[in-house]
Image (cartoon, rainbow, N blue to C red):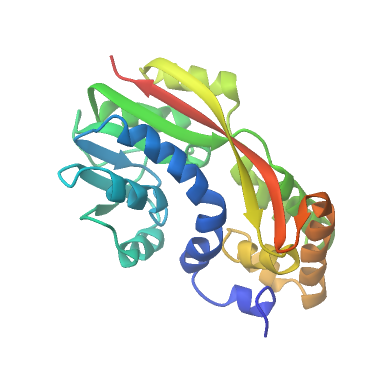
Amino acid sequence: MTPGTDTAFTGSVAQFYERYMVPLIFEPYALDLAARVVALQPGSVLEVAAGTGVLTRRLAAELPPQTELIASDLNTAMLDMAATLGCARPVQWRVADAMELPFADASFDVVLCQQGVQFFPDKLVALKEMRRVLVDGGRLAFSVWNNTGLYNIAVGEALAAFVNSDTADRFCASRKAPGRDELLRLTTEAGFSAVEISVSRIEVHLPSLDEFVLDHLSATPVAAAVSAADAGARKRVGEHVKQQLQRYAESDGVTYPEETHVVTARVQ
């Protein structure tokens, strides 16, 4: 079987996440967050909701060897995958709930979170936990999507048309993040000062969409639902997305604009 068909749904979600989502979607933004932290030269850093560790790996390569790095996530499988990928220097991978971080008060100079805040059941509680573990003068930086995005809109439409609307809604849920005003309110109420919110824009390049879409879906929470659909429906999902993004087509795939909010703040 070829990639993008049934083989896309046999294996570990964590493996597929690292293979398809990290290098094409999350790594470009990790470079941006990492650059903000490296400039601070902190002595200790905590990443919350680290997934398979793309941001932490970048920090491990660029921060001094004496900087303490801890990466936490609630998903054990994601951290197990992260631990197998290797880092330029030692990193602690810790299973932890963002709602109740297992760290002492004032433990870190910097806390980071890339595309995780939108998933927390109580965002204010999670941000208060990040505030609690930061030292006086400590820094917070996190990112959340600021719109559904061209690609995700097309995938959502395809899933609604060829799988079912519930699967489409669950797929798009990761993009339902607080808006600018809500982010400012939450971060301020959590006890942070000097809150700044900017928009980070990049050009995302994806390979041929009729194959990539199914590979990508195999790394998402809707993998089982898409796998259960018949082969014809899965094929039409990929074809629909490719058609919808045709205006961004290049010889080896598509390149389209993507945006995210980046929130930075400090403890004073």
Please identify the residue farthest to the front as the structure is shown.
Answer: 251
- Name the image quarter holding residue 258: top right
Task: Name the image quarter holding the N terminus.
Answer: bottom right
Name the spot of residue 166 as percent of width and height, x first: 73, 53
The residue positioned 42% from the left and 25% from the top of the image is 264
Name the spot of residue 229 as percent of width and height, x first: 75, 71
Name the spot of residue 96 as percent of width and height, x first: 32, 48
The residue positioned 48% from the left and 50% from the top of the image is 27
The residue positioned 49% from the left and 38% from the top of the image is 121
The answer to whether residue 259 of the structure is visible from this angle is yes
Residue 145 position (above or below residue 54)? above
Name the spot of residue 161 as percent of width and height, x first: 84, 57
The answer to whether residue 73 of the structure is visible from this angle is no
Residue 50 position (above or below residue 46)? below
Task: Name the image quarter holding the C terminus.
Answer: top left
In terms of depth relative to the viewer, which is nearer, 27 or 157?
Answer: 27
Residue 97 position (above or below residue 254)? above
